[in-house]
Each structure stands twice: as C-alpha cells, then as structure tokens.
Image (spheres, rainbow, N blue to C red):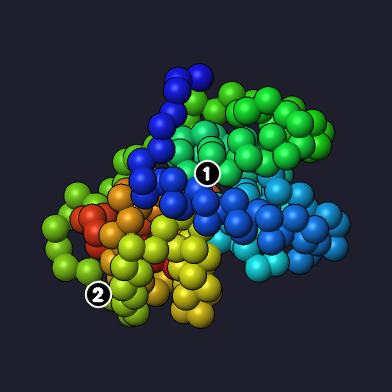
Amino acid sequence: MADIRPTNNDARTAESLIRDLERLRDAACAGCGAPVGPHQSLMAIAIGFKDPPRCLRCLGAALDQEPARLRDWLFDYVRQRECFLEAWNWANREAGLAEGVLPLSLQAIGPVAELPNSPCLESALEPETANPSPLHADAEWDAGDMACGDLVLELRLRLRAMRPGQIMKLCARDPGAPQDLPAWCRLTWHTLLRAEHPTYWIQRKE
C-alpha cells in the first residue's frame, strides 16, 4: 500500500473519528444489542448511523443489503478516504492487527469479494446530472464545512424527515464531498440528481 500522508483537513477529521471510536468503544448495536466494536462503528459512522451505531447485519437489514456485500463496499470506502483509513488503522493497532486489514470478526460475516465496480469507487452521477434544467428543491440545507461521518449522519436524519421522492438541495463545502456523496447515495438508495460542487440535489428514496 502506498504511503498515505493525510492533509491537515484529513488529519483533523481522522482525529475526530478516532475520538468517536474511543467514545463508542463499548457501544451495543441499536438494532440487536450485540457489541459493535470500533471497526463496525466506523462503518456505521460512514453511512450515517453513529449514535448509537449498528452492527453490519442490522445495517444491512436497515438498507436492504446483504451484510457481506455491504461490508465489502464500506471497507472499499474506508480504504479510499484517508481520514477513515487513519481511524481504521488506529482500531487495528488497538486490536493488535496489521494496518489496512479486515478483522477476522468481519471476515466471518461472509466471503470477502473483490468489488471492482463498487459504488464507493464510482464517481459518475445519475443521468439527470447532464440535464441543465432547473430542479425544484423541497428542502435546503447548508452543511458548511461539515465532514465525513457528521455530514452523512445529519443528512440521513434530514432526508428521513422528508417524504419519498422529495428533493434536498445540499451545500457541502467539504473537499471530500464529490467522492463521499455519490458513494453514500448509492449505498443508501437515494438518488443524486445533480452535483455542482458545493451544491448537490438529492432525491429521497421511494
């Protein structure tokens, strides 16, 4: 693996994620009550389930996705984002594991697959993105410089309060948003209609 040197912004975000993992060290799953552990907590944070987090099986049930496939997508995402990778490696060091590896407890969920077409690696938007026509927004939110887990946590809650099919106009200035938001929308089945950083139009899933 290449030597990764986080930017100052990524380093600050990684420190925030690590503090979250320390706080959630003994957290139980909000769905089944099972211990979550730092690696599953980090995956839950990545998709917007932080307080309290959910285990991968309950995340899969909430998102209507097979847990092993969801794990592979999220592990792919972690490895693509420097701040999340730093937090993941912190969790590995705490567990006495080598950096960048998947713990045996997560491998036990199912076979680990190579996902060359993982939604976390795709950057293309939905076809509507190429259409310059105006989009009506049912709600607007300026997230400012909010980054990583906090952004998708709040976004998930705001979309949940909207009706299916409604559109959120989001302003997100975090430099990771152009990669994070398309991946998050694909994982959660919401539709990213258009992206003109820092403005994004997201349609709540039906």
* C-beta proximity under 8 Å, tags 1 and 2: no
Splitting the image into 4 quarters, where does residue 95 fall? Answer: top right
Q: Which residue is mark 2?
A: 136
Residue 107 visible at all: no
Q: Is residue 100 visible?
A: yes
Q: Amino acid at mark 1?
A: Phe
N-terminal of the two: label 1 or label 2?
Answer: 1
Q: Residue at x 41, y 32 (%)?
A: 5
Residue 146 x/y as whole percent? 39, 63
Vertical placement of 62 versus 84: above or below?
A: below
SS class of the residue under badge 2?
A: loop
User: In the rendered picture of this protein, how many numbered marks are placed on residues?
Assistant: 2
- Amino acid identity at mark 2: His
Position of 167 compared to 49: left or right? Answer: left
Depth check, mark 1 against mark 2: the one in front is 1
Q: What secondary structure is found at the residue carrying circle 1? A: helix
**What residue sits right under mark 1 in the picture?**
84
User: Horizontal and vertical percent for residue 82?
Assistant: 45, 39
How far from the left and from the top, in percent, is residue 134? 16, 68
Point out the residue furthest to the top here: 1
User: Where residue 60 sits: x, y (%)?
Assistant: 69, 52
- Bin the neighbour count of mark 1 within 10 Å (Cα to Cα): few under 14, some 14-19, many 20 and up: many
Estimate the spatial distance between the alpha carbons at disc 1 and disc 2, rounded to whole Å: 34 Å
> In this orientation, which residue lies closer to the viewer: 192 or 173?
173
